[in-house]
Amino acid sequence: MGGSASIGWKAAMVKSAVRVFELLEMFEAERRPLRVADIVERLGAPQSSVSMLLKSLVARGYMEFDAAKREYCPSIRISFLGDWTTRMPDRPEAIQDAMRRLAAETGETVLLGRQSGLQLQYLSVIESQHALRFSPSPGTMRPIHRSAIGILLMSQLEDEQIGLLLRRYNAEVGRAGHPAKIAETLRAVALARDQGHYESANLATTGAGVIAALVQTLIRGQRLGLGIGAPIERLHRRRKQLLTAVLAAAKKC
């Protein structure tokens, strides 16, 4: 019984931790205060569990509650957690600052991504204010060879390493979906190396594209990619402006 109770307790702890991050990512996507009913609907979780979690976060100072409006919102304290991980001693501007500045300057969706095994993961997303926009959710995973940022990150690897990675993808994932075309991907990677940036079109999402650049500084030993995403027609029309902006932002952080 003791062993079963211990396993059950650990599973509950993991579930609670995951729920906290889901809650914070939901607020990051919504960017506005929400009522319990709204949160329950978006998370698809029991109201009793959500209410208990919110009250616990309020008590710890991570969440604020407006009693008059019956709305919850992450506190300012949340914005400072983890900021140190992306603020390098010789770089005065954190990546989040650069992303916000880039989003304000261009009006388009701004993406930050990293390699996660065989996948590209979007770490942070600032949505465009345009009605027609390209906006994957933070945390979204894509095959690394099917994203502009992923191809750019692979440009830092040797061709042999890329080949091994893509063959592993085809063995583990490709059979159930679309296998990676190794020769085609290597040509795209070579272009990214030559240009120092990469632009995709219809690669991950039909009708959308991304212009990506490498973040200048390694963050905790890892290379990240910064991108601007938009419908292809708008991306092409504004290519010069958007490319200049994303290269400048990536160089500063």
Image (cartoon, grey):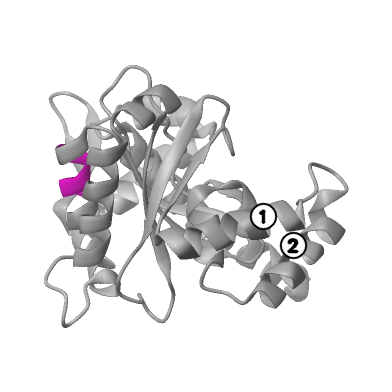
From the image, tell me which residue sits under label 1.
185
Magenta span of residues:
100-104
From the image, tell me which residue sits under label 2.
166
* Secondary structure state at the residue bearing disc 2: helix
Q: Where in the figure is residue 48, as x and y percent of width and height? A: 47, 36
Image quarter of residue 86: bottom left
Q: Is residue 253 above or below residue 197?
A: below
Left or right: 189 as drawn, with respect to 107: right
Count of numbered circles on the image: 2
Q: Residues within 10 Å of mark 1 (few under 14, many from 20)?
A: some
Q: Look at the image and tell me in which quarter the C terminus lies.
A: bottom left
Residue at x 63%, y 53% (from the top left corner): 145
What type is the residue that disc 1 sits on?
Thr
Does the magenta segment cover residue 175? no
Res. 63 in view: no
Left or right: 142 as drawn, with respect to 122: right
Q: Main secondary structure of the magenta part?
A: helix
Q: Where in the figure is residue 105, as x and y percent of width and height? A: 15, 39
